[in-house]
Amino acid sequence: MADKLSAYGTDILQFRFSSLTDKEVLATAVKLAKVIHERKKIFIVNNRADIAYLSGADGLHVGKDDIAPSQARKILGKKSIVGGTAHSLAELKHFQKQEVDYISMGPAFKTKTKPGLKPLKKSQFIKMLRYAKKSIFAIGGINLYNIDPLIKLGITNVCICQALILSKDLKSTVKEFKQCLKKVS
């Protein structure tokens, strides 16, 4: 799937994992890095700086309870991409002070990926967007049927998971998302 997503125009692919052994995670990350880099796209690993480093990933994505972005840069190097996730204005402020290149903000909508989190309200998104000084990506439950309100808020970057996994026509789905985002870029 990573090869297809890269070929169809997905710019950044993030490797998220939960129930794999460290050996399986590293082996998969190495394969993903090769495929994604062959397409000249960006490969990010979730939470694990060691896996990002060993696989040759372009960067790391961290949450508020993971290692600090400054620690990740010591492992991965100053040129690596480091991003963080903010689920509130307080978390956004925290990451604004950190050495991150981008911040993912959400969840925008109810999501199976993070079932315990309530979606941000429109007013919260607006406050967070006003405060943001870094590149922002909206995350959480985004699909082609609910992306318009985010675009109307000025969101220019989105992270998509379920909508791609469940897509019956991956190429068309990626193309449609890119067309939606061109409206605001």
Image (cartoon, rainbow, N blue to C red):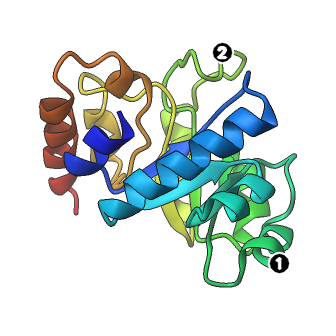
Q: Quadrant of residue 38?
A: bottom left
Q: Quadrant of residue 20?
A: top right
**Of residues 112 and 26, the one drawn nearer to the viewer in this rendering:** 26
- Mark in front: 2 vs 1: 1
| Drawn side of residue 122 relative to residue 65, left or right | left
Instruction: Identify residue for label 2.
Output: 115
The residue type indicated by label 1 comes to: Lys
| Drawn side of residue 47 relative to residue 163, left or right | right
The residues tagged by marks 2 and 1 sit, at their Cα atoms, a distance apart of: 33 Å
Q: Residue at x 19, y 45 (%)?
A: 8
| Drawn side of residue 77 relative to residue 159, left or right | right
The residue type indicated by label 2 comes to: Pro
SS at circle 1: helix
| Drawn side of residue 52 relative to residue 174, left or right | right
Instruction: Identify residue for label 1.
Output: 74
Q: Residue at x 24, y 27 (%)?
A: 144
